[in-house]
Amino acid sequence: MSYQDEEEQIGYQVGSFPKDFGYGNFDHEDSNSRSAEDKPRILLMGLRRSGKSSIQKVVFHKMSPNETLFLESTNKIVKDDINNSSFVQFQIWDFPGQIDFFDPTFDSDMIFGGCGALVFVIDAQDEYIEALAKLNQTVTKAHKVNPRIKFEVFIHKVDGVSDDFKMESQRDIHSRATDDLADAGLEGVHLSFHLTSIYDHSIFEAFSKVVQKLIPQLPTLENLLNIFISNSGIEKAFLFDVVSKIYIATDCSPVDMQSYELCCDMIDVVIDLSCIYGSKDDPDVAAFDDHSSSLIKMNNSTILYLREVNKFLALVCIIREENFSRQGVIDYNFLCFREAITQVFELRLKNQKLEAAEHSQDHDSDYQGSIPSTGTASQNFDQHMSNTAVA
């Protein structure tokens, strides 16, 4: 039975997400505005049984972690188009662990040339000497073809082990991997390391950081969030992709894992209740729409506040209860924030259409042209926030 056949036979879903709650077209975007060839690619690589396919299924296809036990080993490259028609647009290529870079049929230029990020998965509960050798071989080959690739190392399957074991494994793998690259003359290549497990939110947080590096508008989004929280008395804010629970941007304050988990759980609750009660009369109405919002009061005088940005993005804020007395200001600031996000979308789509019209091959120069324009949206938003704060 093939990988694709098994996917069709298993009726999987995780948590509160219904199986048919998936990606579609964003209201401001044409369905054919960006072809698959133009999207950045994320390559999932690693040894056999390291957990590559499980990561892909849990994060992007809502499979229950327990059901990944029934996945067969990948024996060919599996391509998955992730398109929620917002800022999260890319392809994931899942590679079999036994792939041979020296095989004459392996087209390195084609595979690594359009790659935005390469995620190498290492099983932390297994001997990783062979995995490190494969990692060094992979990075050396990929960097030679495309020096702009972002290299991410997932130290995977760390569930059920002690914190000391996690830290020691990460330290040892980091030390060995960087030493191997230095011996190969690649001291300038940067590897990012993440401790991950499909049984908690660590895999979602790690993939969030990978995806953020592929979003050229990330500095603008972060700036908008910084302006928003500073003028609204908010402690922390995440801009979430609702389907995958990846946060595509957050403010400049450090990310606390517990806070991130609470925000993820809140999205589950909102989708769950919306599917049960929100679309009862009209099943064709999406569970998450323009009117979706939620407020949860915690027992530590903290409030979780969710507002939709568009049909695929949600802003989740952590607010102290005493600061929520200014809810009117917060809501007005959110409307200004949403309008600024819409402007960023429109500028991004305009640039994509120009790229398609010019058949440009230099994506970096095209993206660089878009960032100053999105800065205008940020400046306009900042002006609105300042006026609100004075009021």
Image (cartoon, grey):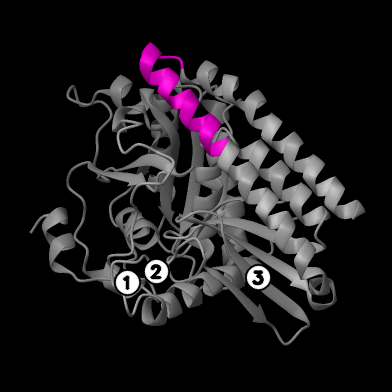
Amino acid bearing label 1: Pro
Identity of the amino acid at label 3? Tyr
Return the residue at label 1: 18
- Which is closer to the viewer, label 2 or label 1? 2
Whichever of callouts 2 and 3 sits on the residue coming sooner in the sequence is 2
Q: Residue at x 38, y 46 (%)?
A: 130
Label 1 environment density (alpha carbons within 10 Å; few <14, some 14–19, many ≥20): some
Question: Do tag 2 and tag 1 residues touch (Cβ < 8 Å)?
Answer: yes
Q: Which quadrant of the view contains residue 40? A: top left
Residues 153 and 200: in front is 200
Q: CA distance from mark 2 to mark 1?
A: 10 Å
Residue holding disc 2: 287
Q: Give the residue at x 55% y 58%.
A: 169
Pick the residue in front: 104 or 44: 44
Mark nearest the camera among 3 and 1 is 3
Label 3 secondary element:
strand
Tell me where residue 185 appears, x and y as whole percent: 55, 21
Quadrant that contains the C terminus: bottom right
Residue interval drawn in magenta? 344-362
Bin the neighbour count of mark 3 within 10 Å (Cα to Cα): few under 14, some 14-19, many 20 and up: many
Residue 367's tag is none
Query: In the rendered structure, which disc, 3 or 1, sits on the residue that comes first in sequence?
Result: 1
Neighbours of disc 2 within 10 Å: few (<14), some (14-19), many (20+): many
Q: Position of residue 223 (x, y in %)?
A: 72, 42
Magenta: main secondary structure equals helix
Count every numbered label the image shows and give the total: 3
Disc 2 element: loop
Would you name the residue on which mark 3 appears?
305
Identified by mark 2, the residue type is Ala
Tell me the mark number nearer the camera, choosing from 2 and 3: 2
- Please say if 173 is above or below 281: above
Q: Position of residue 374 (x, y in %)?
A: 64, 31
